[in-house]
Image (cartoon, rainbow, N blue to C red):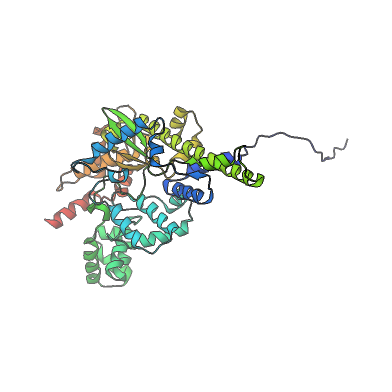
Amino acid sequence: MNLKPVLTTAPTTSQQLVLSPRLYQSLSILRLGAFELQELIQKELDENPTLEIPEAADFEAEPGQVSERELWDDYLGANRGDRGGGNTATPGELTACAETLSEHLTLQLHLENLTDARRRIGLAIIGSLDEDGYLREPVEELAATINKPAAEIEDVLRIVQRFDPPGVAARNLEECLAIQLEQIGAGETAIRIVREFLPQVAHNAFGEIAKSLGVSNLKVRRAVEVIRSLCPSPGSLFDTSPPAAAVIPDVYARVDRGRIRILANREIVPSLKLSRLYQEMASKKSDAEPATTAYIKDKLQEASRLIRDIDHRRTTVTKVARAIAEAQPEFFTQGPEHLRPLGLEKIAASLDVHPSTISRALLGKYMSTPHGIFEFRYFFSSGYAAAKGGEGLAANAVKKRLAGIIAREDAQHPLSDQKLVGQLKENDISISRRTVAKYREQLGIAPSWERKKDTAGQS
């Protein structure tokens, strides 16, 4: 019997997720950061006549606002210090008076003749710098976060890298030192040494460097003297608590008698309402033309959806912030060294939503805490189990503790990476020597023998 293949058609069923325009808009607004949301609202206010910003009296009269206003009064009073009577602080004034690195850079950014889009990229770069002034986040990840091309971010990054302090916004030590050398016109030899021979510099292998570059030992020694006079951490001279006003917090976290309170920052997004005049024009009693009435009704529906979606964004972001506070109480009461491992799934489960919703709520959102302003995603990371059991610590917390141990070490007898492993183990943190070395390098801290050599050179 011959079996011949026969083509036939048969109905099949499959599930496919199709987003309605309304749901798509809601999810899109949830993804927006504060700057983008402000732009969207201004655009809608310009284009939709049925959308209005309430008068101050209307806002104060809204039900349910009194208790939150009282919390704000308490919060602002606690942060006002000795300003003197009669001055009213705004949320933007809750940052430290001492100039931070980000404030210093932001001022220089605004002096550049940039488009608004490129200026926002610059702000995102500045907001992503660590305490040492390094951009540790890969450009590709930053591009995905703010939805901009990586090439455009690279262009703006080169602008920021020209700012004071020299070497700021570098992605690693080599780039940091090379930027400083270029700015002082140190010459090609010094720049090549930084980019290609830093390990040899650390071991004083001047002859090997000279042979590779085809220059004299004396020229290498003079170049190395210049290199060792540079600052490996440009951000170290600035106040790092809290981060700068280059980012706008969506929420404020306050510890009140042991309880963590989360306040939505309503100052960044104005409350919106429908125009009473256009509502009356769209009513059955109106004498307006049918086409006009239909147009107004469409605009009223668009405005209503926008108001609902913005309220949904504020509610969702605030709920996520509260869930983070409940999952990370030690961070808010004791500091970043007590950050615990946390995954999206845990927060999603506590709020009974899909993890993708949490992911959207994290993008470009910031929280002002007693310890500074942090991006929401800072609170999410894997971690390490405690050596003696327990919940463990997040990687960022381990780095903080590692930096603290090194800061307290005997300058004449700095701790090796293996000894740092032992010190961390005494603090119930069990990690490998290789991980300690990686974290130390990410913190911009030299190995023990180099720390000792630098100390000896200064004495």
Q: Is 348 on the left-hand or right-hand side of 285?
A: left
At 38% across and 62% down in the image, what residue appears?
158
Residue 247 image point, x, y percent: 36, 48
Number of marks: 0
At 37% across and 62% down in the image, what residue appears?
159
Q: Which quarter shows the N terminus? A: top right
Residue 35 image point, x, y percent: 42, 49
Looking at this view, is 207 or 429 the one in front? 429
Question: Hey, which residue is sitting farthest right in the picture?
Answer: 1
Question: Hey, which residue is sitting farthest left in the picture?
Answer: 459
Residue 214 image point, x, y percent: 31, 72
The reply to whether residue 110 is in sight is yes
Q: Is 117 on the left-hand or right-hand side of 98?
A: right
Looking at this view, is 448 or 228 the one in front? 228
Q: Is 39 on the left-hand or right-hand side of 176?
A: right
Residue 430 image point, x, y percent: 31, 34
The reply to whether residue 209 is in sight is no
At 22% across and 44% down in the image, what residue appears?
406
Q: Which quarter shows the C terminus? A: bottom left
- Above or below for 249 versus 215: above
